[in-house]
Amino acid sequence: MSIETTSIETTNNETTSIETSSKPVPHEALSDTTLTNNTTVSSPNSDENILSRPDLMLIERWIQPDARVLDLGCGNGLLLHHLMTHKNSHCYGLEINPNKITACLARGVSVIEQDLNAGLGNFRQNQFDTVIMSQTIQAVQYPASLLEEMLHIGRTGIVSFPNFGHWRIRLHLALGGRMPISESLPYEWHNTPNIHLCTLGDFENLCRQLRFRILDKHVVDIHYTSRPWHNLLPNVFGEFALYHITRN
Amino acid sequence: MKIMDKADPDPFVSAPDATRLHTASDSVGLVTPKLAHFDTPLQLKCGRSLPNFTLIYETYGTLNETKSNALLICHALSGNHHAAGYHQPTDSKPGWWDTFIGPGKPIDTTRYFVVALNNLGGCHGSTGPNQVNPETQKPWGPHFPIVTVEDWVHAQAWLADHLGIDCFAAIVGGSMGGMQALQWSISYPQRLRHAIIIASAAKLSAQNIAFNEIARQAILSDPEFHNGHYYAHNCHPRRGLILARMLGHVTYLSDHAMRLKFGRELKSGALQFDYSADFQVESYLRYQGEVFSEHFDANTYLLMTKALDYYDPAASTQNDLATALAPAQCRFLIVSFTSDWRFAPERSREISNALVAAGKCTSHVEIEAPQGHDAFLLKVPRYMDVVGTYLRRVADEH
């Protein structure tokens, strides 16, 4: 299975590959017909910049200076390049999309061609300070074992994913009786790469089972903005969630 | 013995128009090999030393003022110093890695000063078994010391001194050449900024050593080998060398590539019911062996395969490659090919895992390619793109 990365592409050749992208692409123009509304449209020719990626800005806050970082599904290396230059991080990314790997190489980001579904057994225990899995967990075959491996090779983990408990999704299924399609989850049930969707409640429950401790979390909307009501009923109003986790 | 029919043209190699190839805009054009003589004894890993030696090399491109754009090419088993361009306007074939080296190519000679040499023990002009030993005034033959990857790297460092290069921007090698690039990062960590290690391994597997041993036995058991003194007998163990090359060649191709290229196609349309070459694949291997035996020295072949077998930088660090790589300071690009079973992707994975464990900056790209080990010499688009992108970034650094 191919796991695409989370990165929101702004280069010409990659914005055309929406259909093969396996992640929800939260705030990029999606010309896909499955989308019912296309609100935020950012120019595909705009310079890629971490500032245009609030999700990555949120992740950055949890990275300590000089940290050893592994990004599972690093995309075109935008986040890692930013961490290298701004936080002096020692970074590696895993990626399987050839174009994105080349983009990493062009940026000087260390990238390793590796399929997450084959596991992380090639890394050593506590080799990293932080292992990041951004918008990827819902697309892997064995999320629980991958999470365990993450926190075996890393002291802390950062996981972000779309919340399947969002009220609009609940409503879509409850009233429409059909699998939800939304801006954050633009696929039909039969062609979605997102095979392990979960709600915030599901994820936190799994963390308890795996004996993980949640250090911090951000619950945000599709633009990665946090609103007061997100904290009031996160599992109902949050569209995306980012968790900072560690072993108990 | 001539095991190929004389009338056989090589049906697999097209004969290009050989008059103006060197004038192509992406060719380095006509090149002239140079010699570097060294009169200081070189201590070898085997305990012996070479009192003096010569290396033959070629260069492409121009060394910049700060001498920061030098790139060293390390050759594989059958390679040599002629990596790109043409020696004569009438040459029908360029150097062995011309697809990669030239203006605008992945190893861009408008940006890099490229150095390619024939390793010590080689048979194309550097000091080796087929050269005269100054002490005896006879060919070295089997008395030439068994040189190792480490010895080659030391000799290459001397060549760098000779050329006034303190630090290479990058050292690039495929297969056995990759071992040299890896060893550079350990032996001379200050003298390279990047190592590009292609279709290589940090040590050979038992299966790989086994193939080398069969190749050696083919040569050693040839009646014309004369214990390596065949020069004095005015002959050459061609049959042994042909067999060695035929075996090697099979291991450089994938099953898939051979099916595509030959299938079960017959040479003359019908089975001959004798031991001539019925199938195209037989004819091809015989031809490749023939050609190879005409320009390669058997003693060099023995020596190079031994150097391959012996290489194991982790042997001195309790078999922990990460510890062996601890001195390295350069950044690495590891490239492997999916269908390569002679230097399988797993061997490259061992290198990249050890580099990550040692905290070194490394990238590893696994190219989907059906051609087997040979892919590293071929125009595989993604492979060329990856190496070109990486080296453009390196060139932009300084």
Image: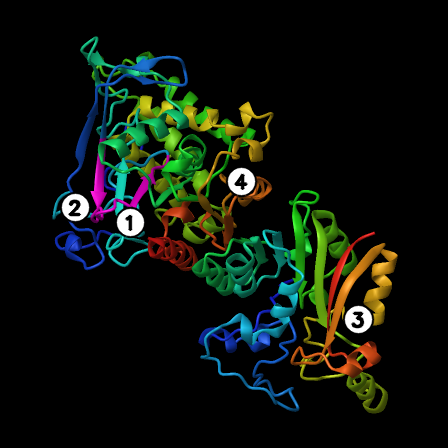
Frontmost residue, B247 versus A235: A235
The span from disc 2 to disc 4 (Cα, nearest Å) is 38 Å
Disc with the residue nearer the chain's start (2 vs 4)? 2
The amino acid type of the residue labelled 1 equals: Val
Mark positioned earlier in the residue sequence (1 or 2): 1
Chain ID for label 2?
B
Q: Residues within 10 Å of mark 3 (few under 14, many from 20)?
A: some
> Gap in Å between the C-alphas at discs 3 and 2?
65 Å
First in sequence, mark 4 or 1: give its number.
1
Residue A198: numbered disc:
3
Residue B123 horizontal/vertical position (percent): 26, 27
- Is B234 above or below relative to A122? above
Element on which disc 1 rests: loop
Asked if marks 4 and 3 touch (Cβ < 8 Å), the reply is no
The answer as to whether the residues below labels 4 and 3 share one chain is no
Is mark 4 in CB contact (under 8 Å) with mark 1?
Answer: no
- Identify residue for label 2: B91
**Label 4 to label 1: alpha-carbon separation:** 35 Å
3D distance between C-alphas at marks 3 and 1: 57 Å
- Nearer the observer: mark 3 or 1; the answer is 3
Three-letter amino acid code at the position of disc 2? Asp
**Tags 3 and 2 both on a single chain:** no
Q: Are marks 1 and 2 on the same chain?
A: yes
Q: Residues within 10 Å of mark 4 (few under 14, many from 20)?
A: many
